[in-house]
Image (cartoon, rainbow, N blue to C red):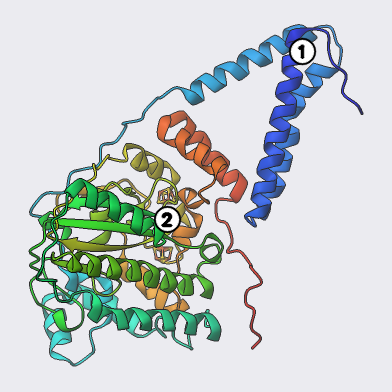
Amino acid sequence: MPLTIPNQPVLIITLILGITICFGWIAFALISSSENERIAFRRSLLMAIIMACPYLIIGQVSFKYQILCAQILLTITILALIVLILPLGRKIYKPTAVPDNYRIDERDTMFSRSELQPETPRFVEYYHTHPKEKISDDRFRQKPGLLSPQSQYYDPYYFNAADAGFNTIECMRDRVEGTINPEKISVIPAEISRFLKQWVLQLGAHSIGIVRLKPYHLYSVSGRGERYGKPVDLDHSFAIAITVEMDFDSVGTAPLAPTVAESARQYVNSGVIAVQMAKFIRELGYSARAHIDGNYLLVCSLLARDAGLGEIGRMGLLMTPDLGPRIRIAAVTTDLLLIPDKYIPGYTVEDFCRHCKKCAVNCPAGAIPEDDPKNHNGINRWKISDAACYSYWCVVGTDCGQCMRVCPYSHPNTFFHNVIRTGIRNSFVFRRIALMMDDFLYGRTPKPKDLNYPAIDG
Ligand code: SF4
Ligand code: SF4
């Protein structure tokens, strides 16, 4: 039925609003379709009808109180818009500062514990002093293991692609350090900081931040490979943290095999950038060390947070402003004088996470707490059960990533999603509505996407 133009301004505005809302939702449906979000596609079309209907009916159908109804509808719309746009609750929770004496012993991390071989002196010594961990760790040792052919989601292509990636990273590990050019080139801190940022983005990093190195950024004791048991003592004053984006579609399949291949790919990509950056700085005549997967001397998420790249959320990962946790991190530490970036606390992340809990609800291992943050060694935060998480990895053979997949912050870095992200940072009312809409559009417990996966028979 063709639309007729009403003769009253209030009815014309009502009609225009109805058409705008309708096309807005249709546009969102098309975007959702391009993102392979089938539920969001269908529900956006439904929203296009439901939300636009009152405006279109009042704007088109003549009845006794038509003008009054249009006035009421427009008033409600304007009030709703004001409430959504008003900056309310922008600084609702201040993230707790990390005490300077806070240090993590890398030997307590899951990756270090998973490398302990039964009957070896390291194994015996570690579990002698950590009998509680022995009970939980024995559980994952009985499972097939990460990338194991016996694991639940084994896929010869993706698993071997991941293995090739991790192997490449291993080859890069002896490149993280190197000789320093004895002829030091004098550089201006602001200029070299600017150059590094431009160059690293050209190399494929998603974001980069510079931070003055603090003791708590470093592990107290190393827990991997030949460095096992050695105190971490790094004579560098600055660190450069970089993030690389993980492919949205691959993460969308989590916990299936493509997600672990993507993790490996991005560990390689971030590692290549970090190794190049460290080499470049050493060529300028300054000490520099790259910190890449399996070879970190520092706690990447804390470092990247202080470098202004994001905030730590419920699942314990860095939540970047435009990709959420859908990233990997690498870093370079150096004695080259740089201009540090400012850490701006992500005040709204905790508020959003307190109400969202989607990662916790969807975690198949029950590793993510659903309650409020608690004090852990002087820091108010959520602490995930790394043993439960890793045990699940050893069952499925991948690094799971369901928490990352379902997180509302993980949506693509596009105009529409960024408008929502801005609203989330701006107002607590917007945050509550955004959460409800995320659940409605994408589902509270969304299933992994089937991107023609598994592609291999048998
Ligand atoms: S990776 Fe999987 S098992 Fe681990 S915390 Fe996330 S959802 Fe849970
Ligand atoms: S899924 Fe929700 S609760 Fe979990 S980290 Fe993301 S925003 Fe926070």
Taking the spot 38% from the left edge, 49% from the top edge, the residue there is 320
Direction from residue 136 to residue 404 in the image, left or right: right
Residue 360 is marked as 2
SS for dot 2: helix
SS for dot 1: helix
Whole-percent x and y of residue 269?
Answer: 39, 69
Q: Quadrant of residue 58?
A: top right
In the image as oriented, which residue stretches furthest toward the bottom?
119
User: What residue does disc 1 label?
Assistant: 11
Quarter of the image that includes the C terminus: bottom right
Name the foreground residue: 325 vs 384: 325
> Which one is closest to the eye, mark 1 or mark 2?
1
Q: In which quarter of the image is residue 277?
A: bottom left
Name the foreground residue: 120 vs 34: 34
Direction from residue 318 to residue 133 in the image, left or right: left
First along the sequence among labels 1 and 2: 1
Direction from residue 163 to residue 316 in the image, left or right: left
Q: State yes or no: Cβ of the residue under disc 2 lies below 8 Å from any atom of ligand 2.
A: yes
Q: Which amino acid does label 2 sit on?
A: Ala
Whole-percent x and y of residue 231?
Answer: 7, 72
Q: In this view, does 39 lie above or below 182?
A: above
- How many marks overall? 2
The reply to whether residue 447 is in sight is: yes
* Within-10-Å neighbours for mark 2: few <14, some 14–19, many 20+: many
Whole-percent x and y of residue 415?
Answer: 55, 41
Q: Are marks 1 and 2 in contact (CB under 8 Å)?
A: no
* Within-10-Å neighbours for mark 1: few <14, some 14–19, many 20+: many
Taking the spot 66% from the left edge, 15% from the top edge, the residue there is 74
Q: In this view, does 119 lie above or below 321?
A: below
Q: What residue type is labelled 1?
A: Leu
